[in-house]
Amino acid sequence: MLSQWLSQPNGKIANMVDDTRVIALHVLTSAGFGISHDYHGGARLPAAGHKLSHRDSLMTLLNHLTTTIVLGQMPWLESIRSLLPKHLQHVKQAINEFDQYMDEMLATERRLMAQQQQNSAKPNLISTLIRTSDEANSEGQTGLRLTDQEIKGNLFIFNLAGHDTTANTLAYAVALLAAYPEIQDWVVEEVDAVLGEDEDVKYETVFPKLKRVLAVMYETLRLYGPVPTQPREALHANTPLTITDQSSSSPSSPPSKSRPTKTILIPAGVGLSLNIHASHTNPSTFPNPSTWDPKRWIKSPSPPASSPSSPATATGTATETDDFLPPPVGYFPWSSGPRICPGMKFAQVEFVAVMSTVLRGARLLPGVKGDVDVGFEDARREVLSVVRDSELVGPTLSMKRPEDLVVRVLGR
Ligand code: HEM
């Protein structure tokens, strides 16, 4: 992705959101489903025997989720597909194509599992689902066995939940870093200190050190989290809901546990919508809530007055002594409790890996559409206006005008 970006005239990238979708889908199919793709082909192009690419079929399903669910329950519609209105035909085609991709992934994985010694096969999500299900079957626990249809249902949920969420977070973060060069410098300082020239980068060594990169993700999710509200339903009569009395709060108030609370009793069957975005912009938890400031997540030791900021030393750099501050109560972009997102760590590792690779090789600048050149401030204003003009598209928060987002990516 980076080499393609660096080869663009003027470094102008006008399809950032599409590109991060391709990356996110490739990471998911590789780490989750054991299928590696070249960036230029892979999920971007239709595979043999397909009319739609994996990405396009998935995006159609995501963007028409309700229609997909309804049509998915009416398989008989296939026989009269050509009589359906055009947009329904398109969604139906995407459902069929996506189903075929899932069938092919299952078949490939079964073939690989049969070829390899069970223990030497590198496990992935599909092989784990197949193996656990087959083991349950052979042990007579047929109730625990998943049918292929159920395995495909699980794969669909992982595609649905793990693709646009991370892709959009990456796209927002790239745009915001381009608009805030001083934050970019602060993050690049860490990336250079941790990765250096080393080609053989190991997760165990570098991930825990790339705290500023992770802070960019946390701060982007605070303001542009892909899931801004979460539905819940009270299962039992008089389910107690304890809320903090915000009227007594100020940024200097003690943690919410020690603030006054009140309890409301919710009748059974009542639906609730947890407003994550409101919680993430509560000034009592996040001072200056509308300012995108990744530094709020990091506690850096103050440099001695006489030395330049964060100097490299023989034993390491000042960035190594940064502390990542624990997320406060009220920050839950991945939800919390028993239904917390199972892909949280996956998304964090993916974000940090992609973003640190980009920042290691390139400088991000704001741009505008077309052949015109404008000053930094005008370009920055344009990028921020596209970023802020966001709404729920399908199930995830997305930019309304992704085609207007232009980021310039220049080699370092
Ligand atoms: C920035 C990235 C991501 C964010 C912000 C995010 C957020 C969320 C949220 C808020 C939920 C709903 C939990 C609830 O109902 O309480 C969820 C569910 C889920 N997520 Fe993620 N997610 C992200 C990435 C991923 C990735 C990469 C994967 C897979 C590799 C994934 C897999 C899932 C699955 C399977 C569920 C459904 C869990 C269930 O029904 O219990 N997510 N995610």
Image: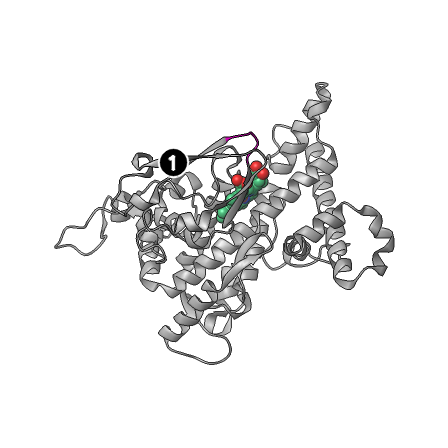
Instruction: Look at label 1 and name its amino acid.
Output: Lys
For residue 268, side relative to residue 175 (left or right): right
Which residue is drawn at the image coordinates 42% and 54% (left, top)?
Answer: 223
Magenta stretch secondary structure, dominant: loop
Where is residue 94? Give x, y as percent: 73, 54
| Residue 109 quadrant | top right
Q: In this rendered view, identify the residue nearer to me: 206 or 400.
A: 400
| Residue 130 quadrant | top right
**Which residue is identified by label 1?**
262
In the rendered image, the quadrant that contains the C terminus is: bottom left
One can see residue 193 in this view: no
For residue 26, side relative to residue 310 (left or right): right
Where is residue 61? Give x, y as percent: 67, 53
Q: In this rendered view, identify the residue nearer to me: 260 or 150.
A: 260
Where is residue 220? Give x, y as percent: 42, 53
The segment highlighted magenta reads 234-238
Which residue is drawn at the image coordinates 54% and 65% (left, top)?
Answer: 402
Which residue is drawn at the image coordinates 38% and 40% (left, top)?
Answer: 205
Query: Regarding ligand 1, which quadrant of the image does it lie in?
Result: top right
Q: Is residue 370 above or below residue 357?
A: below
Q: Is residue 329 above or below residue 370?
A: above
Q: Residue furthest bottom?
A: 372
For residue 254, side relative to residue 358 (left or right): left
Looking at the rendered structure, the secondary structure element under dot 1 is strand
Task: Rate crowding at label 1 as few (under 14), some (14 to 19) or many (20 or more) other CA atoms within 10 Å.
Answer: few
Where is residue 322? Give x, y as percent: 28, 45
